[in-house]
Image (cartoon, helix red, strand yellow):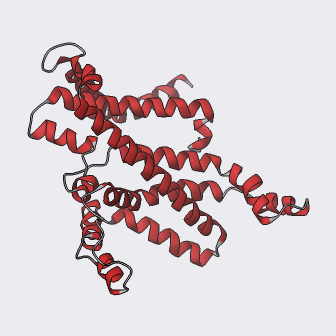
Amino acid sequence: MGAQNRLYYWALAPAAMLLLVFFVAPLCNVLWLSVSEPVFGLRNYAALFDNALLQRIWITTLRISALTTVMAVAAGYVVAYAMAHVGERHRTVMVFCIVLTFWISVLIRAFAWIMLLRPEGVLNGALIALGLIDRPLRLVRNELGVVIGMVHYALPVAILPLYSNMRTISARYGEAARGLGASARQRFLWVYLPMTKPGLIAAALLVFIFSLGFYITPSILGGGSVVMIGEYLRVSFEETLRWGYATMLASTMLFALFVTLAVMAGVVDLRKVFGT
């Protein structure tokens, strides 16, 4: 048994070494730069409380990420519910269409939304032609356009864990509730919805984590008027060369993720949420 365990450890060694070299070491370097550039200390972190620009960027990032999470999970719940209750043929088509979106570049998606939402775009043109508006709506280069693009990108991320959770719910629970006199609305609110709680939490966590690090979509659809942490990190690294601020923001993003996971772990068992 001891020899077999040693064999397992040797088999895991190459993957562990790659993880150490290409993930742990760079992460430690980022943490070190956040407290050592330009001088050693916590002055970069103190800027979170003193620098109004950094505070505004963080608030903007959290606000857009929260909106994206709520909208993507709400829309994803509807799609996942439909997938879990349609026939096998339609379900296969729906799953294929959702997975297909992962193969489309985020850059192409962002520019496609520009073409749809710009003042001379398809959406404004259709609304004007129908007589619903007199002048084009401002749908890009603002937070609205950023949220639309981010929700579109995050929707498959929300759908898949929700669908995976819904597929495990037996129809017998609903039948039992109906046998006890529950209406369709009561069956959904009192039986089905609580049983999808793990899927909802998993989808919300994944979408929120993805949203915190969005860069291309806010940069293109925001048009420079909406700055999130990802865009500010690029500017700090490539243009202003304020590596201390940039690594500090990257570190605080990591801390925010850990805090989010810790809070959720106090509410639910994360091992059940992620299916382990």
Quarter of the image with the N terminus is top right
Q: Is residue 21 something that shows in the picture? A: no
Quarter of the image with the C terminus is top right
Residue at 46% across / 46% down in the picture? Answer: 206
Quadrant of the rendered image containing residue 222? bottom left
User: Is 119 left, or right, of 274 in this rendering?
Assistant: left
User: Is 258 left, or right, of 2 in this rendering?
Assistant: left
| Relative depth, front residue between 99 and 145 | 145
Quadrant of the rendered image containing residue 223? bottom left
Q: Is residue 35 above or below residue 128?
A: above
User: Is 91 left, or right, of 41 in this rendering?
Assistant: right
Where does the image place residue 247, in percent across and percent down from the top left?
Answer: 23, 29
Q: Is residue 60 above or below residue 156?
A: above
Residue at 39% across / 80% down in the picture? Answer: 132
Where does the image place residue 145, in percent across and percent down from the top left?
Answer: 32, 60
Number of disc labels: 0
Furthest residue toward top: 41
Where does the image place residue 136, in percent across and percent down from the top left?
Answer: 28, 73
Q: Is residue 132 something that shows in the picture? A: yes
Furthest residue toward front: 134
| Relative depth, front residue between 164 and 9 | 164
Where does the image place residue 205, in percent across and percent down from the top left?
Answer: 49, 43
Q: Is residue 157 above or below residue 54?
A: below
| Relative depth, front residue between 180 and 18 | 180
Residue at 85% across / 58% down in the picture? Answer: 177
Residue at 25% across / 31% down in the picture? Answer: 52
